[in-house]
Amino acid sequence: MRTLLLAAAAILIAGLAQAQSFTYTTIDNPADPTFNQLLGINDHGVIAGYFGSGAAGHPNQGYTIAGPYTAFRNFAEPGSVQTQATGINNAGLITGFWSNTNQGNNQDANFGLLAMPVGKTFNFLAATDPLVAGQPRIAQALGVNNNNLAVGFYLDANGNSHGYTFNSATATYQPVNVAGSQQVVAAGINDAGETCGSYVNRQGNTVGFTRNASGGVVATFHVPGTNFTQLLGINNSGIAVGWYTDAAGIAHGLYYNSTNGAWLSVNDPNGVGGTVVNGLNNQGQLVGFYTDAAGNVHGMLVTVSP
């Protein structure tokens, strides 16, 4: 693991009282030093992620890891060929998805799941919206709050994405829509039921959004001058994280205050090939990944300081 400190004041947008600083730590499962992504983190600092790119012969393998971040706990849907862990709540409930093949090239089906640790094993629950269609079948559960309400998306027969929430207590699904868009992904949810994600607008640009629990309010956000912004996680203070691409197509992590519109760019110093922030908790910790100069993808833990 590697830890660095980097101030982020250079891209501070008006609205933040003072600049945050970010401490970056690399966390890679030694089973695969070439490809790791950290995707969710709870308030106890337990991280959900995976290794393996998903290319043919290089399957995804989900895992969790807790501080001091030296021991990885692998998990996989029984009978699966690949599994990803995408989010985790304070009770240890994990969101993710699995596949029964490892063909790569977007040929593998994805099936959403929830997994609760029980002793040394997990209890698995399907979280695939029944409206999923098309071939291969794609549905992914991406985040979960402390009320065990999960969010995700599925693809229809035309390849359009549709966001949904999944109530694990009642095994019921509800759509997450953005008016005027046929391409919506719901990726994060906080304890108040506020969701975040992204949609494609009429101009073909990808735009981030937040939506309250009733679905009555959708606030949108994109980094000025860009045509691709995604929000992937949101905490109880309304801080959202995600990523955007610049004019050269390079990914930059995003730290966004949905209550006042202020935002910061988050870039791991070794992420010359790009940085993505995928999840956060209520304790000032973010997780994601970056691509180094050799093209390897590394898991990233970020600690936010005022």
Image (cartoon, rainbow, N blue to C red):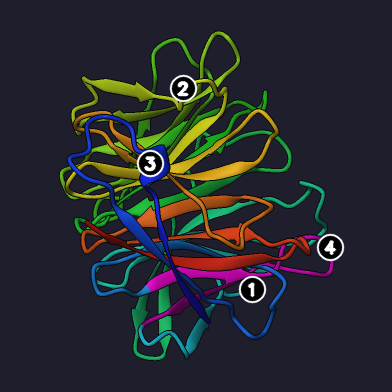
- For the residues bearing labels 3 and 1, Cβ distance under 8 angstroms: no
Mark seen at residue 264: 3
State the residue position of label 4. 56
The one nearer the camera, 170 or 136, is 136
Q: Residues within 10 Å of mark 2 (few under 14, many from 20)?
A: few
* Amino acid type indicated by mark 3: Leu
Q: Which of marks 2 and 1 precedes in the sequence?
A: 1
Q: How many marks?
A: 4
Give how far across and how far down residue 295 sits, in percent: 76, 60
Q: Which of marks 3 and 4 precedes in the sequence?
A: 4
Give how far across and how far down residue 221 sits, in percent: 38, 25
Q: Which of marks 1 and 3 precedes in the sequence?
A: 1
Q: Which residues are magenta?
A: 47-66
State the residue at coordinates (57%, 22%): 227
In the displayed structure, 296 sits above or below 199; it is: below
State the residue position of label 2. 224
Q: Which of marks 4 and 2 precedes in the sequence?
A: 4
Q: Name the element at disc 4.
A: loop
Q: Quadrant of residue 180?
A: top left
Estimate the spatial distance between the alpha carbons at disc 1 and disc 2, rounded to whole Å. 45 Å
* Amino acid type indicated by mark 1: Gly
State the residue at coordinates (72%, 65%): 296
Estimate the spatial distance between the alpha carbons at disc 4 and disc 3, rounded to whole Å. 36 Å
State the residue position of label 1. 79
Q: Residues within 10 Å of mark 3 (few under 14, many from 20)?
A: many
In the visual, does 89 lie left or right of 65?
left
Q: Which of marks 1 and 4 precedes in the sequence?
A: 4
- Camera-near label (1 vs 2) is 2
- Camera-near label (4 vs 1) is 4
State the residue at coordinates (41%, 61%): 40
* Amino acid type indicated by mark 2: Pro
